[in-house]
Image (cartoon, rainbow, N blue to C red):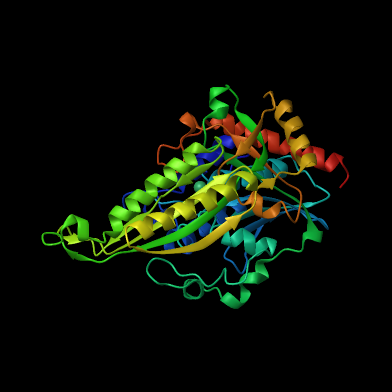
Amino acid sequence: MVEATGAWAVDACDALTGPRFSDHPDYLFRPYLGPAHLNAVEQVAAWMGEVGMTTRIDGAGNLIGRYGEGAKTLMIGSHIDSVRDAGNYDGPLGVMLGVAVCAALKTAGRQLPFAIEVYAFGDEEGSRFPAPMLCSRAVAGSLTLGALEVADAQGVGLAQALELNGLAMSRFTGARRDPSELLGYIEAHIEQGPVLEAEGLALGVVTAIAAQIRYAVTVTGVAGHAGTNAMALRKDALAGAAEMMLAIERIAGQGPSDLVGTVGRITAGPGAPNVVPGEVHFTLDLRAGTNEVLHPAEAAIIAELKAIAHRRALGLHLDKTHALPPSPCDPAFRAMLSRAVAAVGVAPRDIVSGAGHDAMIFSPITPSAMLFIRCKDGISHNPLESVDPADADLACRALLNFIDQLEAADV
Ligand code: GLV
Ligand code: MN
Ligand code: MN
């Protein structure tokens, strides 16, 4: 039974685990358009229905719950896909808080002069297709040419995955919203870092979201017998990739503290103990608060990877799969969120987000802002993710206060 509290939102995230809501038997993994994602859509839609929200699924597979009516719409969103071996709250908490907020409005019999639409985005993480935030980009109308020509690790293309789920590629871009209908976009999310906890604050107001770039890197050597190939004569793709990873770590580590570089996935083929690896694929995720920091670091890393490949006589292919500029949050929305945070008894604290969020997709088209919620030990993208229900309650009340302010502003 849906309750108008943050504590319910936390419980609801916990309920979205287990075999029905994960595509891996041993841990939480909910990639876009997998069976677990579809089951999650069904469950969240049922919760939205309990609150009297009308639900629909758009062409990109996003679930939308609409509360109230009005010429304009305030979007409250986040994602319900997950990384591999995920925690329970990265994404779903923002969606559940949106539902809890609507439950509170309904309980109070509030008629707002605008509609609220809670968006449960299907893909934010890019866990399945190498295209993060595909679903929010469809809604914002900012899909780049070729963005939809992606396939998952099993070779299933987006078009086929959509079709298997009763959706159609031809309708994907139909998820787009006309910005003139929108009042703005707001997202609540766990901080995914340690700052709020260290400062004893339950909530924070995001000022901006860091820029991010991803590459798919392929290193090609020559596979051969591990016993007969003298060390000096090998073209070992994995040893070369290892040197490249250390170079990435070194270059990112030499920059300012907002510059971070990660190799999060690597596969080596053919993958046998007695074969020199002939081909390696790895991902590079590079982020910084500004393009002025990010772009020189990107250039330095590419130059170094090329130099390593040249020295080792290896092939190197770099495919830029993703790039988002830094995204400032809307000053007026930030100010309202700061007042909302203060109204629930928390000292307003501005904070930059190193993690990417759907909010960064909306800031170019409509006023967008984010409310961060303290998480235990700053841990995220990890099953140990934990959030205090009392903090989620404060977030729920702050969101309601934000909505009060928006109403009072006579928008
Ligand atoms: C999403 O969690 C991201 O920042 O990659
Ligand atoms: Mn995430
Ligand atoms: Mn997230």
The x, y position of residue 1, in whole percent, is: 55, 45
Look at 57% across and 68% down and name the residue there: 147
Q: Quadrant of residue 144?
A: bottom right
Looking at the picture, does residue 73 appear above or below residue 173? Answer: above
For this orientation, the residue located farthest to the bottom is 170
Q: Quadrant of residue 221?
A: bottom left
Q: Answer whether residue 86 is visible to the viewer in this image.
A: no
Q: Camera-side residue: 67 or 288?
A: 288
The x, y position of residue 200, in whole percent, is: 57, 21
Looking at the picture, does residue 351 appear above or below residue 157? Answer: above
Look at 57% across and 65% down and name the residue there: 61
Q: Answer whether residue 275 is visible to the viewer in this image.
A: yes
Residue 404 appears left or right of 391: right
Residue 88 appears left or right of 113: left
The x, y position of residue 60, in whole percent, is: 59, 66
Q: Camera-side residue: 226 or 81?
A: 226
